[in-house]
């Protein structure tokens, strides 16, 4: 656990968007930079599915964060000017309440956790702001699932944010993305060690999670990138396990090492809930159509970035967001990027993302 | 088993491309149309990974074949003019020798089967022709893996075919396709019922095969098609199993029904071997480069068809084939199609494929 992690506990029950309630709610977060006296320089960052609130390093926790190059003094989201808050999503397992947390009787929720919606994640973020006595954000931002959460926040709390940043995200998932995530969840649920969600703490469906992570990596990057990086390179003979169906090509070794790194890091039930929340999210639920939902946003400045090689949140979805958000007092910067690294580009193609983020935040 | 299925048994041992040998080899096939007296009107069709040799119906077996609309009297590959032979791939489980067959001691090969190469499938097809006393084909043809087999045939036996038809295939697999197939194989191998390949006949890794089939369907079709067909449609409440992670969206129901249809139809070890053979295939092994390999082809007329939405055998691979095969006495028809159905288009987008195939075969 990060020494920089802070915690807010809600006194009141938290009603979930699709029914059910949590009697106690814990929200984990980290902050960087000073909140000014007017309390109006805060930037709230929602994360993708798997990261914690440790977005960047700090004196309390000098380990690199998941968006290390993007947040900090003199960096694109400049903590000399902005008070940056990153929140661990409701439903996750890095301090915020989720399926791996204990319920009021001290037992882990598991699959007894109520259905999780992106709107719940957004509302938990808003509850955090209330606890911090921040009425209006300078900006709400997020990549991937975090972009959905940021958009839900901007729709549910239109007066609470001056700007919105959506990176490689969408107003709702495509059936292709739903199919992929559904299969990832099935890999986990078919693992006998999942035990219907009732595995012991620290145990669980390791093999299912490994398979799901591999499929994740396949959908997070791009065929073009792998063609350039790996082509048909083989691993050295001495590293081959001898089984004709095991690792032979470098691309297989790459997936294996990523699956290995992920193993044991993330709770399987939390993964299932967060993954499903992305399928369920649909801006059209807020007013009857995507456009009606987007029309509720009152952020003045909006940045939408998408990537040509992203197969999970394809560029046409970024167009949909940018066009739907433009006008009616909203000014949209739309930046389609030719990054090679697919959906993951916001994490790795810093040379392209950094200047766009920096330019936008410099103007806030 | 199809009543139209014919069998050839080789007397001599069959040496495998990557080492090992099969002491006995059985090749299953079906034929349609009459072989003319000159024995020069034969068309050999190799299949994709999973179909049998039953490509189209016949009086002996009136059930529809996997390419029913393409082969028959008056159809694009017209059996009034051509003697069509479809061969069940070596390594498959529909009559030809493969991992599910018994070895010389009467035990199923399982994973003791030698490494399978596309070149072995091509050579088994050539052995079939020898048995049938056909020296030169009018054309060799195949979609997907069958296109790889047809291309290998044209490289290994340059004088044995007058024309080559490659549909949604490639000179070698991309790392993206390898990653996907590798993960499909891992899903099967991680199923405890796989038992290291030593499951009883009729049993085996059903769940792993279901998962692999679902991933297959995701890669065989296209995101665009699903957007149009399914969008975010839900299944009716009464069909929902109640589990929040089970089927909710129509796309999930679609995958489920396809996985269900596939279950028990295909032997898991055969699937593993055939899948790996596609990863291993590389025209560059025949002469040191893809171009050198393609230069060995001496078919005069070549048809290359690819599909814009194919993510498994993308269009740039069809370009590579068409450009590499053009010239040096070879005339290439290259047809990029805007079909929506991705890699599977050759099976379902008949309105686009039929006229192209018909035009090409009418000219032979």
Image: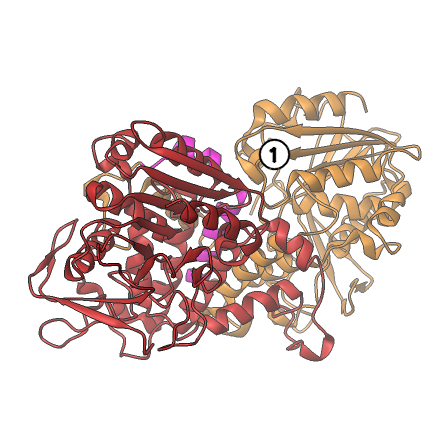
Chain colours: A orange, B red
User: Which residue is labeled 1 in the image?
Assistant: A308
B76 is higher (above) or lower (below) than A23: above
The crowding category of the residue bearing disc 1, from other C-alpha atoms within 10 Å (few below 14, some 14 to 19, many at least 20), is many
Give, as a single range, the part of the protein colored magenta: A207-232
Depth check: B105 or A35 in front? B105
Q: Position of residue B364 (x, y in %)?
A: 36, 46
Residue at image location 26% in from the left, 37% down from the top = B297
Q: Is residue A330 left or right of residue A178?
A: right
Q: Position of residue B137 (x, y in %)?
A: 26, 50
A100 is higher (above) or lower (below) than A148: below
Q: Position of residue A195 (x, y in %)?
A: 49, 74
Kindly state the secondary structure of the residue where label 1 is placed.
loop
Q: Can you tell which quarter of the image residue A78 is in? A: top right
Residue most extreme to the right: A328
Q: Is residue B98 left or right of residue B321?
A: left
Depth check: A99 or B67 in front? B67
The chain holding disc 1 is A
Magenta stretch prevailing secondary structure: helix
Q: Is residue B304 magenta?
A: no
Residue at image location 48% in from the left, 73% down from the top = B261
């Amino acid at each position: 656990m990060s020494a920089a992690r802070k915690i807010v506990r809600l006194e009141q029950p938290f009603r979930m968007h699709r029914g059910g309630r949590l009697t106690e709610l814990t929200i984990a977060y980290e902050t960087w930079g000073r909140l000014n006296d007017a309390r109006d320089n805060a930037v709230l960052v929602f994360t993708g599915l798997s990261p914690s609130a440790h977005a960047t390093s700090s004196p309390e926790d000098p380990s690199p964060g998941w968006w290390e190059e993007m947040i900090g003094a003199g960096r694109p989201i400049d903590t000399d000017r902005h008070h940056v808050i990153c929140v661990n999503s409701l439903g996750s397992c890095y301090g915020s309440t989720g399926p791996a947390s204990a319920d009021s009787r001290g037992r882990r929720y598991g699959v007894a956790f109520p259905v999780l919606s992106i709107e719940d994640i957004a509302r938990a973020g808003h509850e955090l702001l209330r606890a911090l006595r921040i009425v209006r954000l300078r900006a709400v931002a997020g990549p991937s699932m975090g972009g959905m959460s940021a958009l839900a926040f901007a729709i549910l709390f239109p007066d609470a944010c001056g700007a919105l940043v959506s990176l490689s995200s969408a107003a709702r998932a495509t059936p292709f993305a739903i199919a992929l995530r559904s299969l990832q969840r099935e890999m986990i649920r078919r693992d006998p060690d999942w035990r219907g969600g009732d595995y012991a703490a620290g145990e669980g469906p390791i093999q299912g999670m490994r398979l799901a992570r591999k499929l994740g990596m396949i959908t997070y990057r791009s065929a073009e990138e792998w063609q350039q990086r790996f082509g048909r390179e083989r691993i050295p003979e001495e590293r081959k396990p001898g089984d004709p169906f095991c690792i032979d090509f470098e691309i297989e070794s790459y997936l294996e090492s990523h699956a290995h790194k992920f193993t044991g890091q993330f709770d399987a039930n939390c993964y299932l809930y967060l993954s499903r929340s992305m399928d369920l999210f649909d801006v059209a639920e807020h007013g009857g159509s995507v456009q009606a939902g987007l029309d509720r946003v009152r952020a003045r400045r909006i940045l939408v970035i998408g990537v040509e090689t992203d197969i999970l949140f394809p560029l046409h979805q970024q167009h949909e967001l940018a066009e739907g958000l433009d006008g009616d007092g909203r000014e949209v910067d739309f930046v389609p990027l030719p990054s090679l690294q697919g959906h993951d580009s916001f994490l790795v193609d810093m040379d392209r993302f950094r200047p766009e983020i920096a330019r936008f935040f410099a103007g806030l």
